[in-house]
Each structure stands twice: as C-alpha cells, then as structure tokens.
Amino acid sequence: MADNDMPTDKKGVAVYCSSSDRLAAAYYDCARAVGRLLAENGVPLINGGGRMGLMASSTDGALEAGGTVIGVLPKFMLDRGWNHPGLTRTICTPDMHRRKETMAGMSLGAIALPGGIGTFEEMFEIITWRQLELYTGPLVICNTMGFYDKLLEFLAHVDSEHFMRPGAPAKLWRVATTPEEAVAMVLQPADTIVDDYTKGKF
C-alpha cells in the first residue's frame, strides 16, 4: 500500500542500514534478527524500504514474525522500482531530506546497523539532532562483527580533543554487539544531556 497521509497509530523504530547485496552472511543475519525481534515486541519497523541488502533482510525478518514494516522512499526510488514488494505500508517522499525527516518523526528510537555513506549520514544526523534536543529517542549503534570499532575509536578521539560536549558520547548513543542487545537498548528511554549548553549558558 502506498500513501503519503495515512495516520500512524504507533511509533516504531527506525533502522538505518546498507542496501548492498555483497556482504558477509552475518550482517544479513543480524538485520533479519533485528526485524524479527522488533516484531516480537510489537514494534513497527521503519526503514528505507529497499528491496536489497540489509534493508530487505530486516523487512523480511519482521514480516516473517508477523510484524509491521513501514518503508519510506523518495519518489525517484519508487519510480525505479527499488522498493521491497512486501512492505506493510509504503510512504513516498519528494526527496531524501523529507525521507529522513519522516523516518525520524515516526520513530521512538533508531538503530544503526552496518552500512555505507548513506547509513553514516543518517546516523550522524540523528546524533546531531539528539545533541540539539531535536530528537529525543535513543540511538543504538549495532556493532556487528566489530564493524564500527574504528569509527567508535575515532569518536573517542574527537571527544578527547574536546570537540564534543562533556559526557556526550555516553549520552548521545548506545553501542550493542548483538541484535538482542540493540533491540533491548532502543526500547529503553533515552539518556539526556544537561549542561551549560542545554541551559542556554554559552
């Protein structure tokens, strides 16, 4: 079903991930498990709606467990037939920016599975929005097979050089190593940062 305006009764979890079909099997297994676990918890899965890669695996996992999957795609992707055919609901947006805004607005939290540039961009935008208190849900980085180890090391370096607010890494994101941890973490209330910045004292 494709629509732009159908109301959403329940917020879901946004899952950011790769659309590549050339990955190790463990990455697909993780994505499928995340979809299944969200469905088993009665939480809708919100993703980019793609028919390939980890996006497709997460969708398949949720659907196989009787869950709901909401795919959000810009019109040009739908025109090219890149959407997963089994989506419970398909939302068409005019562009990529509206796609990300829609996914965030419909979600109570977000999980970043392994991915490429597009996944990084989505993940860092949510981190930025959390820092600015524009997004109040938790963000979980699912570090499957140590995929994000080097990025997390770099972020620790950024923090040590004081390019982040004090305590930010521990508050802005959570790190999981398994699908079970990722889903459990994203369903817990998000941490908040209370400091001079959030109090308006610069």
Image (spheres, grey):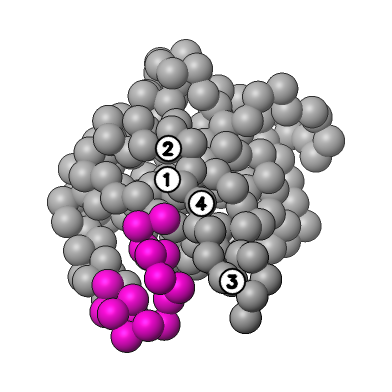
Asked which secondary structure carries label 1, the reply is: strand
Q: Residue 188, can we see it?
A: yes
Asked which secondary structure carries label 4, the reply is: loop
Question: In the figure, 188 relative to 133: above or below?
Answer: above
At x 79%, y 28%, the residue is 7
Cα–Cα gap, marks 3 and 4: 12 Å
Q: Residue 78, can we see it?
A: no
Cα–Cα gap, marks 1 and 4: 17 Å
Asked which secondary structure carries label 2, the reply is: helix
Q: Left or right of 61: which side holds 136?
A: right
Looking at the rendered structure, which numbered label has been put on residue 192? 4
Comparing labels 2 and 3, the label whose residue is closer to the camera: 3
Q: What residue did someone put label 3 on? A: 197
At x 45%, y 73%, the residue is 165
Residue type marked 4:
Thr
Displayed quadrant of residue 40: top left
Residue type marked 2:
Val
Q: Quadrant of the C terminus?
A: bottom right
Q: Residue furthest right?
A: 5
Cα–Cα gap, marks 2 and 4: 14 Å
Comparing labels 1 and 2, the label whose residue is closer to the camera: 2
Q: What residue did someone put label 2 on? A: 186
Q: Earlier in the sequence, mark 3 or mark 4?
A: 4
- Is mark 3 in CB contact (under 8 Å) with mark 4? no
Cα–Cα gap, marks 1 and 2: 7 Å
Residues shaded magenta: 156-171
Q: Residues within 10 Å of mark 1 (few under 14, many from 20)?
A: many
Question: In the figure, 155 relative to 182: above or below?
Answer: below
Asked which secondary structure carries label 3, the reply is: loop
As for residue 158 lying within the magenta part, the answer is yes
Q: Left or right of 122: which side holds 105?
A: right
Along the line of sight, the residue nearer the viewer: 148 or 198: 198
